[in-house]
Amino acid sequence: MNFTVGFKPLLGDAHSMDNLEKQLICPICLEMFSKPVVILPCQHNLCRKCANDIFQASNPLWQSRGSTTVSSGGRFRCPSCRHEVVLDRHGVYGLQRNLLVENIIDIYKQESSRPLHSKAEQHLMCEEHEEEKINIYCLSCEVPTCSLCKVFGAHKDCEVAPLPAIYKRQKDNSRRQKQLLNQKFEALCAVLEERKRELLQALAREQEEKLQRVRGLIRQYGDHLEASSKLVESAIQSMEEPQMALYLQQAKELINKVGTMSKVELAGRPEPGYESMEQFAVSVEHVADMLRTINFQSGAAGEEEDEEVALDGEEGSTGPAEERTDGPEGTGLH
């Protein structure tokens, strides 16, 4: 199906508006930013509601803004670049609003509410029936066409649906799949962060246990060394005693103390390699190789998801023509 040349000059404006809309999409809800828009320290933007949802998920014990309890703030990671965002006790309400983006959204909505060209649809004409507009979509051939082509032309035996319904379905399906993809990778990152925290805690516990043992040995050997030093000093002083009776009396007591000191049992030295922490080495090569194999699924599961999304996209539509849009050929983008 070919279109008339008159439609081409209008394509540039629509394409520019689509590009602008992509820049105004929130990476969390995948919808256009809703006011107020907050700007993160990494210069990425989020709807304040979406930022608050991420913040609350990362800080479940954080008190809300209206609570009487004073909180010390919290932190979360930017969904676009994973940069850690540290907030004060005001939470996301302490983030600066991006008034520039909000103004651009207002202008965009005003412009998009008006047709780019009042005769835009009139320029999209059927080549075989020059007076007929392209207004339906052939589900069998997967091409847009006109009503006369369906009644008398090449698509008279095909299944068709209204063009706006197919456009909306494919656009909604694409957005939903982007949202699901983003959610699954966020969940995967959360699992990795949790596992990293668990392993670091285990390593820290082992390190603290070893340090405590070594510190205990240092204290024990230090105390024994101090007591032995005092005993040696006493022995030296006794050797200088001039009175024989007193010397013999002190010598007997000193001999008993030396015998007792020699029988003191000290804790054994740490075994060779005690300081090693090599048992905490982690091999992630196979996990990295597995992550690189992540790809889009195909088959029955994917088709069921598409059909469910398609039904959601058609909610609220009426008319027998739109009921014919349930064919497998009319599914959205994959």
Image (spheres, grey):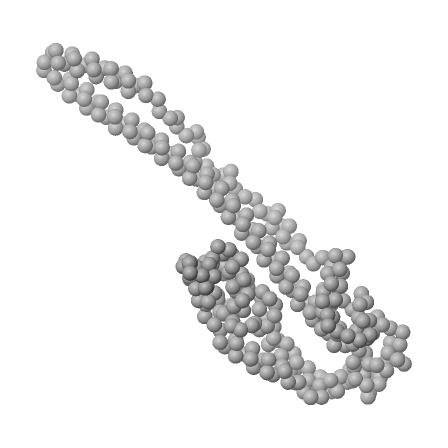
Residue located at (66% from left, 53% from top): 293
Q: Is residue 115 left or right of residue 128?
A: left
Q: Quadrant of the N terminus?
A: bottom right
Viewer can see residue 85: no
Q: Quadrant of residue 69?
A: bottom left
**Above or below, comparing residue 280 to residue 107 in the picture:** above
Q: Quadrant of the C terminus?
A: bottom right
Near-viewer residue (221 or 322): 322
**Above or below, comparing residue 107 to residue 244 in the picture:** below
Residue located at (75% from left, 73% from top): 317
Residue 215 x/y as whole percent = 36, 35
Q: Is residue 142 left or right of residue 228?
A: right
Q: Is residue 124 left or right of residue 239?
A: right
**Above or below, comparing residue 144 to residue 54 in the picture:** below
Residue 281 x/y as whole percent = 52, 42
Near-viewer residue (239 or 108): 108
Residue located at (82% from left, 88% from top): 131
